[in-house]
Amino acid sequence: EPLTAEALVTVDVGDVAENLPPVIDAVTVSDPRGEGDEITLTVLASDVDLPVGEQLRFAFDTDGDGVFETVNETGVVTLTFEDNGPQFVPVLVTDELGAVAEGGAEFSVANVAPTLIVADGLQTDADGNVTLTGRFIDPGLADTFTLTIDWGEGSDPDVGALPANPSGSGRFAVDHTYTAPPPPSGRFEVDIALTDDDGGEDRVARNVVVDTNEAPTVQ
């Protein structure tokens, strides 16, 4: 019978290199950081064994619900916050093999005071009645407000609550009657203040002309 021979060849391929995870080098947060401002987070990351042509993937949990809803390869995301207070935005950086680096951006969003818009040149009717109307703007969409009006004739100020306005603006109208004393006619400076629930305030002064003199009657 023909002779046969078998040979066992062993090839040493060496140790397989372990994939190293990315490293988050820096996270920056833009200014200003107030309610309603566009705040940009920039994540810088590196990976020593990332193959040429591959990109790291950045994921952001922008609303703190545990879901990383914003994913990109730039490491940049722009956010807007409706209320002031401390914020933490978690970040995941993933390489092409699924290795992950975890980090985040921690910062504080500042309160922004409301802005009052009230027309000047108010005048009462013959009975001393006047209606003060105005509007306000506030980027803190979750803020509630206190409106205080000092009518300038010595009476106690009117104080009222205004609710939050998801649209970022609101309106008000307040009635008042000037009676004697003081004198039934004159010019009064009205002080109007609007304060949000975080202490931010805007204040304006407006004049009201009170003229309760009735026109003469022809007999």
Image (spheres, helix red, strand yellow):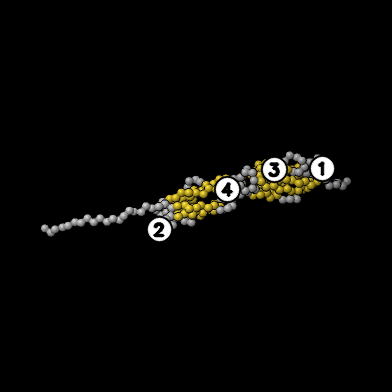
| Residue type marked 3 | Thr
Numbered disc in front, either 2 or 1 = 2
Placement of the N terminus among the 4 image quadrants: bottom left
Name the N-terminal-most of marks 4 and 3: 4
Residue plotted at (15% across, 57% down):
4
SS of the residue under disc 2:
loop
Mark 1, residue position = 183
Mark 4, residue position = 109
Mark 3, residue position = 148
Numbered disc in front, either 4 or 1 = 4
Q: Residues within 10 Å of mark 2 (few under 14, many from 20)?
A: few
**Labelled disc at residue 51:** 2
**Can residue 82 be spotted in the picture?**
no
Determine the CA span between mark 3 and mark 2.
Answer: 64 Å
Q: Position of residue 199 (x, y in %)?
A: 64, 44
**Can residue 201 be spotted in the picture?**
yes
Q: Residues within 10 Å of mark 1 (few under 14, many from 20)?
A: few
How many numbered marks are there?
Answer: 4
SS of the residue under disc 4:
strand
Residue plotted at (70% across, 49% down):
118
